[in-house]
Amino acid sequence: MTKLHESRFDAVLADALGPCGELLAEVLKVPLVYSLRSSPGYSAEKYSGRLPLPPSYVPATFSELSDHVTFTERVKNMIYALYFDFWFQTFNENKWNQFYSEVLGRPTTLLKTMGKAEMWLIRTYWDFEFPLPLLPNFEFVGGLHCKPAKPLPKVTYSYLFLSEFHYQYRIKWKTLRICQ
């Protein structure tokens, strides 16, 4: 920890689904920035980022619902949201709360510490997602995690072409070239 303190980092970039990045930012007293694709049922975004996501309008991730839902599908989405909320809150939360309180030396919770994030970078494009309300500290940064595209190499493909000639099969080889 002393080496990290001496390095004087400006911020901590962490994934919201893997605990301890927020704890490191709290100990180092630097801003926390989350980089996240999405959490199951948007649970981390709802409880830690205080993102308003009404289940009657925003389909939960992994629910396979579209943006046009019937009443039955809204009920199904509500059940998904309750399931993911229950899963998120019971996933060893008491152990994490105890651990964070011990490390920081004061009573705190995982969600309270996660809620101190300055910025949430969502690793997708806004046009791939369903419309949902966003707070100013949530920003879509699709492609942030990707390497720059490389040009296609010149490739030679060979394929087998069978033709019937005089009741016998003859094998003809043809070559395709993909050029830039």
Image: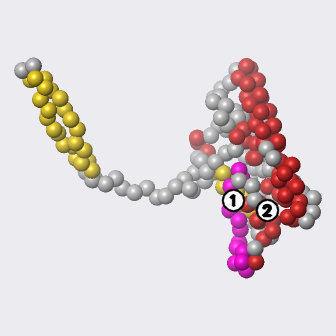
Query: Which residue position holds label 1?
Result: 14
Query: Which residue position holds label 2?
Result: 23
Please provide percent x and percent y for residue 128.
58, 41
Q: Residues within 10 Å of mark 2 (few under 14, many from 20)?
A: some
Please indicate, yes or no, whether residue 148 appears anywhere in the rendered image: yes
Magenta segment includes 97: no
The residue positioned 21% from the left and 35% from the top of the image is 160
Magenta segment includes 4: yes
Please provide percent x and percent y for residue 81.
76, 33
Residue 76 occupies quadrant = top right
Q: Residue furthest bottom?
A: 6
Q: Over which residues does the magenta segment extend?
A: 3-17
The residue positioned 36% from the left and 56% from the top of the image is 151
Residue type at mark 1: give it.
Ala
Q: How far apart are the alpha carbons under marks 2 and 1? A: 10 Å
User: In the image, 168: left or right of 50?
Assistant: left
Q: As displayed, is residue 135 above or below residue 9?
A: above
